[in-house]
Amino acid sequence: MKTNICYKELYENGIEILNRAGIAEAKLDARLLLECVCGTDHSALIAHPDRVVSEEEQSRFNEFISRRAKREPVAYILGNWDFMGLTFKVNSDVLIPEQDTEVLVEEAMRFFEDGMRILDLCTGSGCIALSLLRYTNDTKAVGTDISDRALLVAQENADNLGFSDRAEFVRTDLFPAEDMGKFDIIVSNPPYIASNVIETLAPEVKDYEPRLALDGDEDGLVFYRRIVENVHKYLYSSGYLFLEIGYDQAKALTDMLENDGHFHDIEVIKDYAGNDRVVRACYY
């Protein structure tokens, strides 16, 4: 291993390796990994490009670059990811919080009032529920997931963000026990990718993110059916349901809600790229 390598040179070496591996965001990824290893921020490349990197830092950076070149997501290598201005622990037991999901949180926040109770189905890292707690007052949340390991991540995020007294996480297959009462708002980013589509996704997704959190069965709609069929047991009258969807699922879900006959104010909200991303409905 070369010694006395400088910060900028190590960064450029990382970019070259990632470029050869076909990583589209090679510059960004190399910078994020180097900053993690060296405990620096984005200004270091400009302010201290000649900073000598220790052998330990060089070794760790090269290990991170090697993992990224094999298409492991940056978020899993770093062990955390930012979402809604907060930093969440993530690992391969949970989905990586995506910017598109912020649309779900922001839309739900438009209908929040102090003191409301939130139910977050398929909570994963807890990023949706905990973000809603962060930006509302005197609210409480219940998050559910079928994965014990995902719930451990969600609980750690609640602890780290100081929401342990406002958030409760329950292991269950979608809905909690009915004796937990009703909720003012229900949110969910459920598995919604059709089973036969998963293998066509980027390696970062199909090879590393938990299939349990991706697979929406044959047509990708199985969880939406279950939610619409059972939500009346958990949502107060005039309460709101917010569901993240795939770009081509808006009509199927809005038809499902309209045919159920218990929802009004059904609206599809687009993400930052102009794709259908969230369906909102009010329960009679």
Image (cartoon, rainbow, N blue to C red):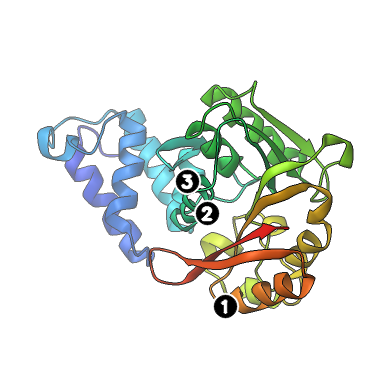
Q: Quadrant of residue 41 in the image?
A: top left
Q: Which residue is mark 1?
A: 248
Distance between the alpha carbons at the discs numbered 2 and 3: 21 Å
Q: Amino acid at mark 2?
A: Leu
Residue in the image at 71% along x and 69% along y: 257
**Circle nearer the N terminus (2, 3):** 3
Taking the image as shown, residue 273 lies to the left or right of residue 158, namely left
Q: Which residue is mark 2?
A: 104
Taking the image as shown, residue 88 lies to the left or right of residue 141, namely left
Distance between the alpha carbons at the discs numbered 2 and 1: 16 Å
Residue 98 at what x, y percent from top left? 48, 54
- How crowded is the residue under tag 2: few (<14 C-alpha within 10 Å), some, or many (20+)? many
Quarter of the image with the N terminus in it: top left
Quarter of the image with the C terminus in it: bottom right
Q: Amino acid at mark 1?
A: Asp
Residue 93 at what x, y percent from top left? 65, 45
